Image (spheres, rainbow, N blue to C red):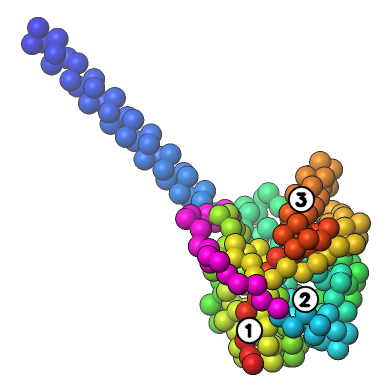
């Protein structure tokens, strides 16, 4: 009896060690995958409770004399998130794109970075013409944009100041969705930190969990569909239809909040009196 028990103990020990190694390997693979993937998880979410509605001087925002500077992480971000708003603005729009969306964080044998950069810049330039925006590409590292990297930060600062904005529109970086791309969050973080050095009086932050301002985008949907399709390298076939469905559903839900057909939500922050 003693010999039988002693025979089982080494087997159980080996089994336990094997399971431990497998679990360690799985944790290591998952950790590396999470580090490599630019999508980041934020849980629990931060959210402002009972945030009062704000009017960011709407009459000025839609005035033809107004200058608006928009900062996004990649080509297609503006069309995906806020093209309804951009199509209804009448002022001078400067669109700053901090990365080319060239997938340079992929292994080199899996993608053509230079071709991605060429195509995506062309798509963004074509789409931006629909809302008469001047496009400036900063050429930051796709999927790895660092808001504190000195050269890129200084270039963003100079570009923002030179555009002489009355309004700045950028990604939310504090009250973000559960899953958020690091380039979205980081471009928004750098933009908001630099906004006080510009002439802007308001910052409007999108993709936020804590909106306090809704912009009526009624009547823009057909054009929004066309703009999404311009980014054919990213949205095509069934994926394009899924994206259009998601964007439309979100626009309808936000429009319902203010009693309009569609809308887009922002967290409005007053920067100057």
Q: Secondary structure at mark 1?
A: strand
Which residue reaches farthest left? 2
Residue nearer the viewer, 80 or 5: 80
Residue 251, located in which quarter of the rendered image?
bottom right
Span shown in magenta: 37-55
Mark 1 — residue? 270
Left or right, 264 with reference to 187: right
| Circle nearer the viewer, 2 or 1 | 1
Which residue reaches farthest top? 1
How far across and how far down the image is residue 199, in percent? 69, 92
Mark 3 — residue? 249
Identify the residue shown where x is 74% and y is 83%: 57
| Crowd band around label 3 with a 10 angstrom C-alpha radius: few (<14), some (14–19), many (20+) | few
Quick check: marks 3 and 1 in contact, CB under 8 Å? no
C-alpha span from label 3 to label 1: 29 Å
Left or right, 216 with reference to 50: right
Identify the residue shown where x is 81% and y is 61%: 260
Q: Which mark is residue 128?
A: none
Identify the residue shown where x is 70% and y is 65%: 265
How far across and how far down the image is residue 95, in percent? 77, 76
Which residue reaches farthest front? 259
C-alpha span from label 2 to label 1: 21 Å
Quick check: marks 3 and 2 in contact, CB under 8 Å? no
Relative to 212, is 201 above or below? below
C-alpha span from label 3 to label 2: 25 Å
Q: Is residue 187 magenta?
A: no
Mark 2 — residue? 95
Main SS of residues in magenta: loop
| Crowd band around label 2 with a 10 angstrom C-alpha radius: few (<14), some (14–19), many (20+) | many
Which quarter of the image is occupied by the N terminus? Answer: top left
| Crowd band around label 1 with a 10 angstrom C-alpha radius: few (<14), some (14–19), many (20+) | some
Residue 140 visible in the picture = no
């Amino acid at each position: 009896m003693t010999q039988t028990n002693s025979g089982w103990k080494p087997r159980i020990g080996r089994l336990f060690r094997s399971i431990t190694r497998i679990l360690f390997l799985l944790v290591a693979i998952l950790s590396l995958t999470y580090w490599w993937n630019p999508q980041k998880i934020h849980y629990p979410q931060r959210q402002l409770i009972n945030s009062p509605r704000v009017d960011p001087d709407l009459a000025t925002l839609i005035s033809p004399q107004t200058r608006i500077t928009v900062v996004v992480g990649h080509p297609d971000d503006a069309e995906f998130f806020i093209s309804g708003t951009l199509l209804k603005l009448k002022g001078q729009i400067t669109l700053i794109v901090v990365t080319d969306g060239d997938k340079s964080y992929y292994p080199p044998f899996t993608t053509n970075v230079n071709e991605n950069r060429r195509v995506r810049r062309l798509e963004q330039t074509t789409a931006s013409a629909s809302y008469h925006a001047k496009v400036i590409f900063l050429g930051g590292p796709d999927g790895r944009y660092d808001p504190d990297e000195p050269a890129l930060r200084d270039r963003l600062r100079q570009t923002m100041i030179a555009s002489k904005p009355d309004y700045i529109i950028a990604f939310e970086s504090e009250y973000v969705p559960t899953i958020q791309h690091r380039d979205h969050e980081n471009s928004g973080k750098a933009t908001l930190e630099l906004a006080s050095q510009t002439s802007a009086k308001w910052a409007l932050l999108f993709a936020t969990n804590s909106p306090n301002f809704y912009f009526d985008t009624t009547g823009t949907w057909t054009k929004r569909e066309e703009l999404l399709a311009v980014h054919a390298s990213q949205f095509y076939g069934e994926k394009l239809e899924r994206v259009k469905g998601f964007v439309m559903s979100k626009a309808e839900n936000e429009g319902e909040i203010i009693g309009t057909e569609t809308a887009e939500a922002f967290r409005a922050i007053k920067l100057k009196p």
